Image: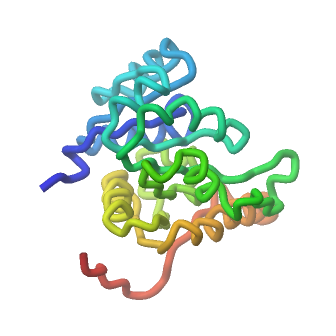
């Protein structure tokens, strides 16, 4: 059986705060991790800093090397980054973490014409890729610390098995991954990020996140 620990995960944009934090947590859990950056040297430097056997490559090289590819870039860089990795991700699970924040009004929900960044990513990459989205509502600076964050990760995608892979990776990272349903539902989590940023400022919160209440039963495969 293939588990999170036996997969090779590529983090595109892995020198950024969110990408580096996810890479560090997964690698520390025994997952084979490659991080990518626009500049290969930057990726190598960050990989050496993070340790745990992480390898640094260019974004395209990392995407080619990973079984699962997690894209962690700002909304403004989403289109060009996906175009860069598109030749290397056919038949793979691509996890889009993009939140459609449009500065300077990042505390205001501003969804793209497609309805969500995830649906936009699926359109840009095409049907040959299994698109899943997640990791929208976890504070990157907390993810980079050796603490129990107590945050849930809602995972969206039209392929239940692919969602399950990403739920497993979220769990390996020390979070709680939960199935959030179809890819279009990603709009809810993406929009919630702007609300969390507003809460952080208004109530002086150091990285608000979300937790789902109630006694959840593990869904059937």
Quadrant location, the C terminus: bottom left
Residue 11 horizontal side relative to residue 114, left or right: left
Q: Nearer the viewer, residue 65 or 151?
A: 65
Above or below for 205 versus 41: below
Point out the residue furthest to the bottom here.
214
Total tally of numbered discs in the picture: 0
Quarter of the image for residue 44 reads top left
The image quadrant where one finds the N terminus is bottom left
- Report the front residue among 62 and 82: 82
Q: Position of residue 26 (x, y in %)?
A: 34, 44
Question: Is 39 placed above or below 192 here?
Answer: above
- Residue lying farthest to the top in this orientation: 41
Residue at position x 75%, y 57% in the image: 112
Residue occupying image coordinates x 25% and y 43%: 7
**Quadrant of residue 189 within the rendered picture:** bottom right
Q: Where is residue 92 drawn, in percent x and y?
A: 36, 46
Report the front residue among 179 and 113.
113
Asked which quadrant contains residue 190, the reply is bottom right
Q: Given the current orientation, which residue lies at the most extreme front position?
A: 127
Q: Residue at x 55, y 53 (%)?
A: 122
Can you give x and y, in whole percent of width and height, for residue 144 in the image? 48, 42
Q: Residue 70 placed where, x, y %? A: 45, 44
Tell me the colour scheme of the image.
Answer: rainbow
> Which residue of the protein is positioned furthest toward the left in this rendering?
1
Residue 157, compared with residue 140, is above or below; it is: below
x 70%, y 64%: residue: 115
């Amino acid at each position: 059986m293939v588990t999170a620990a036996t997969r090779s995960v590529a983090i595109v944009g892995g020198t950024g705060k969110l990408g580096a934090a996810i890479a560090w947590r997964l690698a520390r859990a025994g997952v084979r991790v490659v991080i990518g950056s626009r500049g290969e040297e930057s990726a190598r430097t960050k990989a050496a800093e993070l340790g745990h056997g992480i390898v640094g490559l260019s974004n395209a090289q990392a995407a080619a090397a990973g079984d699962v590819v997690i894209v962690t870039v700002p909304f403004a860089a989403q289109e060009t980054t996906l175009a860069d990795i598109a030749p290397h991700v056919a038949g793979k699970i691509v996890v889009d973490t993009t939140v459609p924040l449009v500065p300077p009004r990042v505390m205001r929900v501003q969804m793209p014409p497609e309805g969500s960044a995830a649906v936009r990513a699926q359109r840009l990459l095409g049907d040959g890729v299994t698109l899943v989205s997640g990791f929208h509502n976890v504070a990157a600076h907390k993810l980079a610390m050796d603490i129990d964050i107590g945050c849930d990760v809602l995972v969206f995608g039209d392929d239940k098995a692919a969602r399950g892979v990403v739920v497993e990776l979220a769990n390996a990272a020390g979070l709680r991954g939960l199935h959030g349903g179809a890819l279009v539902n990603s709009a809810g989590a993406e929009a919630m990020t702007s609300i969390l940023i507003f809460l952080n400022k208004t109530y002086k919160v150091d990285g608000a996140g979300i937790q789902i209440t109630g006694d959840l039963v593990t869904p059937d495969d």
